[in-house]
Structures are given as C-alpha cells and as structure tokens.
Amino acid sequence: QVQLVESGGGLVQTGGSLRLSCTASGRAFSTRAMGWFRQAPGKERSFVGAINWRGDTTDYADSVKGRFTISRDNAKKTVYLQMNSLKPEDTAVYYCATGGPLFYTGRDYPSLDYDYWGQGTQVTVSS
C-alpha cells in the first residue's frame, strides 16, 4: 500500500512559479515511475508529466514542456513538480500518482496504469 500527499499549491500571478511536492509512505516508491496530472473545473484529468524510477528520464505534455520540470529524491520518497512561467490555463487541481510496473524502462508514460493517487493540491494562476 502506498499513500501519497501533495503540497505546495497556492495562488500565484501569471508568470510566477510554484513547486509542488508529493511525498510517499509505504513500500516501493523508488521502484515506480511517478506521474503528475491535473484537472481543471469542468475538464477531464490530463497528463502533465512523469519521471522514471531512477529519476533520469522525464516526459511532459506539450502544454507544459519547457516550463515545468519533474524531479525526485528517492531517499526522501518525494517527487517534485517545478512550475515556471505559469499561465491562467495552468489553474487546476494537481495530483501525483505511482505508475507502471516496477523498474519500468519504457517511454509511454501517459498510458501507464497509475494506481495510487494523492488527494490533490489546488494551483490557481491569476491574470
């Protein structure tokens, strides 16, 4: 069983930055890919990005590429989402999730089976 807790959300102006954290408890964090997703009001949840278990491979949605960066610290069982140059359209609840089989080495992160989810943290970008 894995529990995930996101933090770091808040209100920021257009062009600002936020760093979200997702801390895990339980087993096998360091062996799983981690994904970030978001859900805006009235919209479906969408893939933001992901990082592999070693932390040396990342993948991002086109809408955030070049602005968002995912990293992880397996010793701290924490994954981070650094968000720069924020736009109003980035406003959403952001979720982290564990994904895929142990030691996944593929590249299809959006299609992985994400099984454990955090409760989400609200990010609001004002114009």
Image: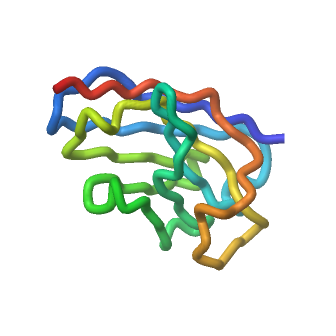
Image height of 76 relative to 125, above or below:
below
Residue in the foreground of this view, choosing between 49 and 62: 62
Residue 43 at x, y = what percent?
Answer: 51, 35
Q: Is residue 2 left or right of residue 37?
A: right
Residue in the foreground of this view, choosing between 39 and 12: 39
User: In what quadrant of the picture does the N terminus appear?
Assistant: top right
- Give the residue at x 74% y 43%: 116
- Point out the residue furthest to the right here: 1
Q: Is residue 97 left or right of residue 13?
A: right
User: In what quadrant of the picture does the C terminus appear?
Assistant: top left
Residue 89 at x, y = what percent?
Answer: 31, 37
Image height of 124 relative to 1, above or below:
above
Which quadrant would residue 86 be assigned to in this image? top left
Tell me how the rendering is colored.
Answer: rainbow
Residue in the foreground of this view, choosing between 66 and 45: 45
Image height of 55 relative to 71, above or below:
below
- Give the residue at x 76% y 48%: 115
Image height of 124 relative to 4, above or below:
above
Residue 75 at x, y = what percent?
Answer: 58, 52
